[in-house]
């Protein structure tokens, strides 16, 4: 037991140190991606890299999911701008899958103590209904589909469910498909100068986001009530 605890704390220390270093190193880059000038310069640099550019965007997507607070939209739009709608989508999907498998495996191995240290007791209490929800697959799909919810944060909660790593990853990929596709389509449209398509996709995405943000608490509350009922049943 002492050996297991020692291994856990060593892993946790290394994880926190690497996460802190990666966050500090990546934050200026992610922040600059919001500016059109930097996006154009970075897109040109990625294009010159060829296949190495694919690796760079893949790693940035993995980093964005693992370091949940980092915004993913700019990276996804940039992927579409550089590699087209479907090429960018493939890279983003691959990065999402890799990060999800990494996080799921890590949390399942080290359990609730790791989640408690990463997310805090309040977050675990808020989302504890995930462990008791009978219709887990549908619940996970809806949570990932609702705009406005922190998707990277939800990946850390996956091991709380009854789903296997494969089931959880597959459901999250299917649910994330529309959002990732819209982001890469916007990037491709912007690069091609197709601004009507860009603003059409942006408008639909924004409208869906507003609706999702407005109703997300009500939807989550409904699932939380069902989860509590399942505990007593």
Image: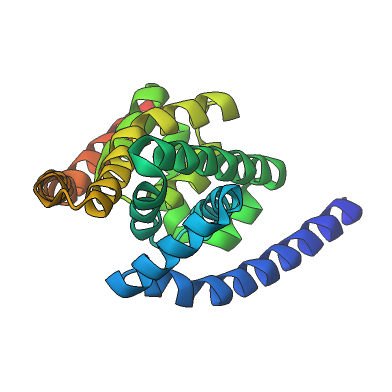
Q: Which residue is drawn at 31% across and 74% down?
A: 37
Q: Which residue is drawn at 44% across and 66% down?
A: 42
Q: Can residue 120 be seen in this view?
A: no
- 25 in relation to 8, above or below: below
Where does the image place residue 118, in percent across and percent down from the top left?
A: 56, 61
Q: In this view, does 193 lie to the left or right of 63?
A: left
- 96 in relation to 123, above or below: above
Where does the image place residue 13, in percent across and percent down from the top left?
A: 74, 68
Q: How many labels does the image show?
A: 0
- 217 in relation to 137, above or below: below
Q: Is residue 138 visible?
A: yes
Q: In this view, does 24 lie to the left or right of 198?
A: right
In which quarter of the view is residue 230 placed?
top left
Where does the image place residue 168, in percent across and percent down from the top left?
A: 50, 30
Q: In this view, does 198 lie to the left or right of 23?
A: left
Can you say which quadrant of the picture contains the C terminus? top left
Residue furthest toward the right?
3
Where does the image place residue 51, in percent across and percent down from the top left?
A: 59, 47
């Amino acid at each position: 037991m002492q050996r297991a605890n020692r291994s856990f704390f060593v892993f946790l220390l290394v994880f926190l140190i690497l996460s802190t270093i990666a966050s500090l190193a990546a934050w200026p880059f992610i922040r600059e991606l919001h500016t059109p000038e930097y996006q154009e310069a970075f897109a040109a640099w990625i294009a010159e890299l060829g296949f190495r550019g694919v690796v760079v965007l893949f790693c940035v997507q993995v980093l964005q999911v693992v370091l949940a607070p980092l915004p993913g939209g700019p990276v996804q739009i940039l992927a579409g701008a550089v590699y087209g709608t479907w090429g960018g989508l493939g890279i983003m999907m691959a990065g999402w899958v890799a990060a999800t498998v990494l996080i799921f495996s890590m949390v399942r191995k080290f359990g609730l103590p790791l989640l408690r240290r990463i997310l805090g007791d309040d977050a675990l209490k808020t989302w504890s209904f995930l462990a008791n929800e009978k219709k887990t697959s549908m619940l996970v799909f809806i949570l990932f589909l609702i705009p406005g919810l922190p998707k990277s944060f939800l990946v850390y909660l996956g091991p709380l469910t009854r789903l296997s790593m494969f089931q959880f990853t597959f459901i999250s990929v299917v649910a994330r498909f529309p959002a990732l596709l819209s982001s890469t389509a916007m990037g491709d449209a912007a690069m091609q100068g197709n601004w009507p398509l860009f603003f059409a996709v942006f408008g639909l995405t924004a409208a869906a986001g507003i609706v999702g943000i407005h109703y997300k608490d009500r939807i989550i509350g409904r699932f939380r009530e069902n989860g509590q009922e399942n505990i007593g049943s």
